[in-house]
Amino acid sequence: LDTVETCEGVIAGSVKGFVGLGGNFVRAVPETGLVEKAWRRLGLHVEIATKLNRSHLLPGAVTYLLPCLSRLERDRQASGDQTVSMEDSTACIHGSFGSRPPVSPNLLSEPKIVAELAKATVPDMSSIPWDKWIADYSRIRDEIERCFPQHFRQFNKRFLTPGGFHRDIKASKRIWETPNKKANFKPPTTLETDPDIDVSGQKVLTLITVRSNDQFNTTVYGYDDRLRGIHGTRMVLLMNEADIQRFGLTAGQQIDLETHADDGVERRVRGLRVTPYSVPQGNCAGYYPELNPLVPLWHRAKEAHVPAVKSVPVRIVC
């Protein structure tokens, strides 16, 4: 199941349990209101984490919140201290190793947890040498190199060099591995931005969700966004000044925002501060994940199921 299908299953009741290895799933997904309500009906909810977050506060019938080693802590296995690999958003891979002693000798690393889950789930039925892999993580990287030699040549050597190494992404070099050796584009079937929602009418705006400079995914480190000049809060709605005048609003006014949809579900976020900003007229912007409750699960890419968080029809409620 992908993220959207998992949420649909939780709401429908077909998903009975959830095991999360890190992350803040419920806070990160769309349709927050329905998902949070249904989440409490799960038969089993397991979270393995290094830091508390919103998802941990939503218990199922049986709930476990389990700690694990963080990347700051020394990960000692049978062959000694281990190093893991990290890949950033530019496809650059580098090594990461902890130097602090673990807060408890009972903590397990994430690779160890995955291996033990696999061994318990399919005992004596797997050809993967889980114990050998966990004894020495370099063996995992050797296997990755064997499977993907074009990207991970000399993996164990290169990822520890200063700055790491970049995967060989041909498109980043304008090399197109297509039959005609050119970049190929698929034309859209329609020019409608939101074909699944009627966005006609003067009172409808298109919401774009954004992130501040001071957050990483759902982890918010501060309430100041120096890139946009916003301070002390994230509960803002960025609007074009012409739209502020058109709706009869004033800068700093508190408003509610609701999704413009006719499926019978109320999706509303309250207490947003109207903030003039250079966004195109007819559009508005606000922060992720605070505005996730406004995004319907069914408002998504047709095949990839990516939630349409950059194009959500909304209405202002004063």
Image (spheres, rainbow, N blue to C red):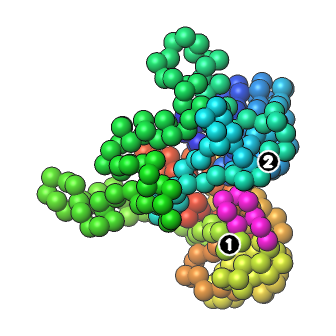
Three-letter amino acid code at disc 2?
Answer: Pro
Q: Is residue 153 left or right of residue 194?
A: left
Question: Circle 2 — which element?
Answer: loop
Q: Which residue is mark 2?
A: 101
Residue found 79% across the figure and 71% down from its top: 222
Q: Which residue is mark 1?
A: 212
Residue found 60% across the figure and 86% down from its top: 278
Q: For the residues carrying marks 1 and 2, which lies nearer the camera in this image?
A: 2
Q: Position of residue 289 (x, y in %)?
A: 70, 59
Q: Nearer the viewer, residue 120 or 180?
A: 120
Q: Is residue 202 covered in magenta?
A: no
10 Å crowding of disc 2: few (<14), some (14-19), many (20+): few
Above/below status of 258 relative to 15 = below
Residue found 63% across the figure and 75% down from its top: 284
Q: Which residues are magenta?
A: 215-222
Q: Nearer the viewer, residue 109 or 192?
A: 109
Three-letter amino acid code at disc 1?
Answer: Ser
Quarter residue 166 falls in: bottom left
Q: Nearer the viewer, residue 260 or 30?
A: 30
Residue sticking out furthest to the left: 180
Quarter residue 36 falls in: top right
State which quarter of the image contains the N terminus.
Answer: top right
State which quarter of the image contains the C terminus.
Answer: bottom right
Above/below status of 246 relative to 109 = below
Q: Is residue 219 covered in magenta?
A: yes
Above/below status of 15 relative to 89 = above
